[in-house]
Amino acid sequence: MADFVQNSQTKTAVRELASPIASITAFNLIVQSVITDNPFGCVAYMTAGENHDPVEKTKEGYTARLVYEDANAKSIGTASHKFSTLAGFNAGVTALLAAAAVTTAHGGTALHDAENDAFADANGELYMVNFSRDRVTLTSYSDEAIRTAVETWADTVPDLA
């Protein structure tokens, strides 16, 4: 019987950002530019009889953070809500800020703590470029030219410094 032999040809590289991406809007613009502009030169492909664009969004997630403050601006409660789409995130934040019963239960005022929101996207073909608020991770690549292409592109995006 044949044994499995470890294959260490795939790699992971991480770019820690000097400061988190400032807003969900800036984050979404970066991800959308990768999908639209295909800066890595990916090609369309077919798998399981289905055609795929050169760059596709395969997963996304957004976490809204709320803080509840009393009349003295002292934090008296927090909330964290996860959404699977940007539209859901935006609608959810609006709904949560308007949820009078929840705000009353906390005994304070609801504020969107946007600085502590979290968001992540993963897109790619045979390798993955994962975007989160404070890092870009390149995974499952073997050719250093892929890392070079992603790094060269990231160097041109001010929010990815």
Image: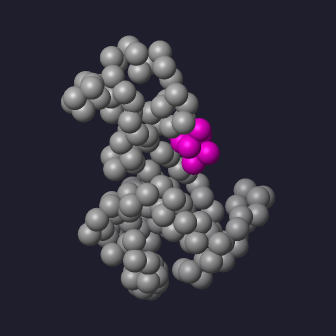
Q: Residue at x 62, y 69 (%)?
A: 35
Front one among 65 and 70? 70
The count of marks equals 0
Q: Is residue 61 left or right of residue 51?
A: left
Query: Quadrant of the image for the C terminus?
Result: bottom left
Q: Quadrant of residue 32?
A: bottom right
Front one among 43 and 96? 96
Q: Is residue 111 visible?
A: yes
Front one among 121 and 12? 121
Q: Is residue 34 left or right of residue 8?
A: right
Q: Is residue 2 visible?
A: no
Q: Is residue 19 above or below residue 86?
A: below
Residue 89 among those drawn in magenta: yes
Numbered range of the magenta stretch? 83-91
Q: Residue at x 33, y 28 (%)?
A: 68
Front one among 92 and 38? 92
Percent x, y for residue 57?
Answer: 60, 58
Q: Is residue 130 above or below residue 80?
A: below
Percent x, y for residue 51?
Answer: 76, 63
Q: Is residue 9 above or below residue 146?
A: above
Q: Quadrant of residue 141?
A: bottom left
Q: Is residue 109 left or right of residue 86?
A: left
Percent x, y for residue 13?
Answer: 33, 70
Q: Is residue 97 above or below residue 99?
A: below
